[in-house]
Amino acid sequence: MYRYRQIAQVKYGHMSDYFASLRKLLELAAERGYQRPSVLMPVVGTVNELVIEFKYDTYEAWERDRVRTAQDEQFRDAMVELATHVVQGSARDELFTTPPQLTDG
């Protein structure tokens, strides 16, 4: 199991615009058959931080989505629109997996 997270802090006063852009991006992703993420906010922690988390069964599945979205001009444009509402320098990506010592098989 792999979990890919995109984490960013939304600019103050931009949350409504961010969510509008995110809805457009999620609709486009659904139309294209990309993996559907969960969207999370911390209960406590960094103010205006959001986490977009994707779950993949394999590394190859994550890589396929990464390549497909990178080659999709309309999707890239939607990501750029979303990024206009993010505090510069706050965005980061993470990719986690289950330790092999804790998996069955």
Image (spheres, helix red, strand yellow):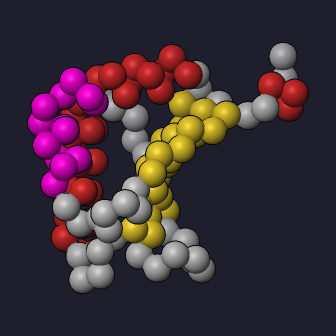
Q: Quadrant of residue 63?
A: top left
Query: Foreground: 90 or 96?
Result: 90
Residue located 45% across and 69% down the image = 49
Q: Where is residue 55 in the image (x, y as percent from the top left)?
A: 54, 38
Q: Give the residues drawn in magenta, as a range.
A: 69-81
Q: Is residue 44 left or right of residue 39?
A: right
- As drawn, the residue found furthest toward the front would be 89
Q: Where is residue 16 in the image (x, y as percent from the top left)?
A: 23, 75
Asked if the stretch drawn in magenta spans residue 35, the answer is no
Residue located 33% across and 22% down the image = 67
Q: Position of residue 34 (x, y in %)?
A: 33, 32
In the picture, the quarter occupied by the C terminus is top right
Instruction: Mark yes or no: residue 44 visible.
Output: yes
Up/down of 26 relative to 32, above or below: below
Instruction: Mark yes or no: residue 39 visible.
Output: no
Query: Foreground: 32 or 60?
Result: 60
- Judged by its main secondary structure, the magenta piece is helix
